[in-house]
Amino acid sequence: MRDLSLEFETEFGTAKVLDRVTFTIGEGEVFGLVGETGCGKTVTALTVLRLLPSNAKITTGNVKFLGEELLSKTDAEMERLRGTKISMVFQDPATSLNPVFSVGEQITRVVRTHEDVDKRAAETRAVELFKRVGLPDPETVLRSYPHELSGGMQQRVMISMALACRPKLLIADEPTTAVDVTIQAQILDLLMELQREFRLSVLLITHNLGIVAETCQRVGVMYAGALGEVAPTKDLFREPLHPYTQRLLKSLPRPDARGQPLASIPGSVPSLIDPPTGCRYHPRCEFAMKSCSTRRPALLEHSPGHRVACLLYEGVTE
Ligand SMILES: Nc1ncnc2c1ncn2[C@@H]1O[C@H](COP(=O)(O)OP(=O)(O)O)[C@@H](O)[C@H]1O
Ligand code: SF4
Ligand SMILES: [Mg+2]
């Protein structure tokens, strides 16, 4: 994704949600996108999938996948890509599964949309997938309706559907937020196992830095629709450059701990209808200078692979 800016037309005005978002995900790499609720993580994912609501307008930038521009593809082309090359797992499995169809009908439909197989063969494939994602008694699951499964089982079904067509890129948007704490670790472990087995590239969206520390090779920290810092995970934890990232890490008791949500930071996330000028973080930044309210920092490379968008690193002193 390069320089992607996006607005929503709302009854209160135009919300300038994404501000020149730029990042890459390598083949077989797990990239974490982290930030507070409302900062634009899901919108970023929906942009890649081209599943944006109709009031969204992309104003700058582009999204390339395997060398091809996604934003200029037709809806039919995108439909083919979703589920074959790009799959997704959403936060809430209960609302992603269709309540009126059995799980088996749903997964065999996915399989048969992309593979020329009969119903029987699709069911066999579904059972294999259910086994692979650790669902007990796959034949019974196949005949079940979503409400008959626990949240953890529903999420495993979603994951098996996402994998059904061997995607290259898996987008997982807060995949463990809606399930029980005890199940969260199992789901994450499963995702990471599958990632290695299928050499998936993963965009892992989370508001949880502990999850990032454990699973992601690289990470982007988003604040109010703008990326403040992009770095290899170990560099981000060792030497956070952006004041917002520093703040986030300082308030974590154990950066490697699982289950750590983002700690709160004084002030509140700004309205994106009228976002702060200059650096979007300036009203909350302890290092804010005069220029910060007028000059927009660029996401620049500070050391190999470590980018930061902050005027402190552009030699600005006042
Ligand atoms: N359909 C929409 N219309 C208007 N604003 C939206 C719409 N969808 C999301 N937004 C706004 O975009 C911003 C980013 O939302 P989102 O990407 O869902 O945040 P996150 O996933 O980081 O919690 C929020 O301010 C949200 O209110
Ligand atoms: S640009 Fe200014 S306000 Fe923004 S993070 Fe850097 S110092 Fe803080
Ligand atoms: Mg979200």
Image: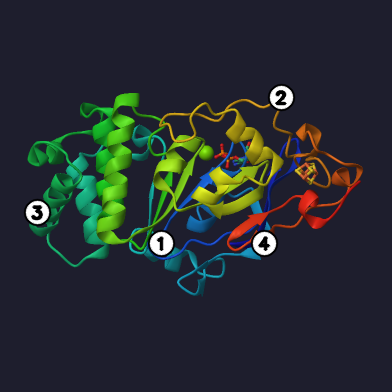
Image depth: mark 2 or mark 1 in front: 2
| Separation (CA) of disc 2 from disc 1 | 42 Å
Image depth: mark 3 or mark 1 in front: 3
Q: Tell me the kind of residue under disc 3.
A: Thr
Q: Tell me the kind of residue under disc 2.
A: Pro
Instruction: Please give the residue where the numbered disc 1 appears in the rendered image.
Output: 79
Sequence-wise, which precedes: disc 2 or disc 1? Answer: 1
Image depth: mark 4 or mark 2 in front: 4
Instruction: Please give the residue where the numbered disc 4 appears in the rendered image.
Output: 301
Instruction: Please give the residue where the numbered disc 3 appears in the rendered image.
Output: 124
Residue 219, can we see it?
no
Q: Tell me the kind of residue under disc 4.
A: Glu
For label 4, the SS is strand
| Separation (CA) of disc 2 from disc 3 | 54 Å
Residue 195's tag is none
Quadrant location of residue 168?
bottom left
Q: Are marks 4 and 2 in contact (CB under 8 Å)?
A: no
Residue 311, can we see it?
yes
Quadrant location of residue 157?
top left
Q: Tell me the kind of residue under disc 1.
A: Glu
At label 3, counting other C-alpha atoms closer than 10 Å, the crowd grade (few under 14, some 14-19, many 20 or more) is few
Q: How many marks?
A: 4
In the foreground, 164 or 293: 293
For label 1, the SS is helix
* Residue under the image location 91 percent in, 46 percent down: 318
At label 4, counting other C-alpha atoms closer than 10 Å, the crowd grade (few under 14, some 14-19, many 20 or more) is some
In the foreground, 291 or 15: 291
Image depth: mark 4 or mark 1 in front: 4
Sequence-wise, which precedes: disc 4 or disc 1? Answer: 1
| Separation (CA) of disc 4 from disc 2 | 28 Å
Sequence-wise, which precedes: disc 2 or disc 3? Answer: 3
Sequence-wise, which precedes: disc 3 or disc 1? Answer: 1
